[in-house]
Image (cartoon, rainbow, N blue to C red):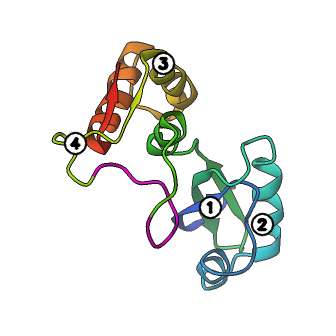
Amino acid sequence: MAKKIAGTMKLQIPAGAANPSPPVGPALGQRGINIMEFCKAFNAKTADMEQGAPCPTVITYYQDKSFSMEVKTPPASYYLKKAAGLKPVGKRNRPRGAENPGRETVATVTVTQVKEIAEAKMKDLNANDIEGAMQIILGSARSMGIEVK
């Protein structure tokens, strides 16, 4: 007999850095999920990824307090900022795109870099081939104020 699903939740956690402190601990604790078990499983699953890369994670938790998780690839904006070499700015010390995308350009990336990003993100994108995936990444770059040459 299949387990009865109690619900799902989405979190964005840095790769290899899940710990019981907020926001992970309280989000899992109020749903009755074993926090330390989740942290160990998540860190083991993301051990081969770049440390600190934000990983969107979909957690399905069941009525018997068990869970399953699906870790996705980091967002396209993360890869674009890294490829463009944008430096951290602002209150939270994170790299940012343009204030007025379309009117100003903050950085440039090459078509080969866009293709590498599209290949890395291919399993999470809604695209049939690499050209379609590249168009999705190009749209993200355009909306961030990053020019593709």
- Counting from the top left corner in percent of width and height, residue 113 is at 50, 22
Along the polypeptide, which appears first: circle 1 or circle 2?
A: 1
The secondary structure type at the circle numbered 2 is helix
Instruction: Determine which of the numbered discs, if any, sits on residue 39 in the image.
Output: 2
Mark 2 → mark 4, Cα distance in angstroms: 41 Å
Question: Tag 3: Cα neighbours inside 10 Å, few (<14), some, or many (≥20)?
Answer: some
Instruction: Determine which of the numbered discs, if any, sits on residue 13 in the image.
Output: 1
Name the residue carrying label 4.
Answer: 104
Foreground of the two, 123 or 31: 123
Along the polypeptide, which appears first: circle 2 or circle 3?
A: 2
Along the polypeptide, which appears first: circle 4 or circle 3?
A: 4
Query: Which region shows up in magenta?
Result: 90-98
Mark 4 vs 1: CB contact within 8 A: no
The secondary structure type at the circle numbered 3 is helix
Mark 4 → mark 3, Cα distance in angstroms: 23 Å
User: What residue lies at 72% left-to-right and 44% top-to-bottom?
Assistant: 50
Could you tell me the amino acid type at mark 2? Answer: Cys
- Counting from the top left corner in percent of width and height, residue 76 is at 46, 39
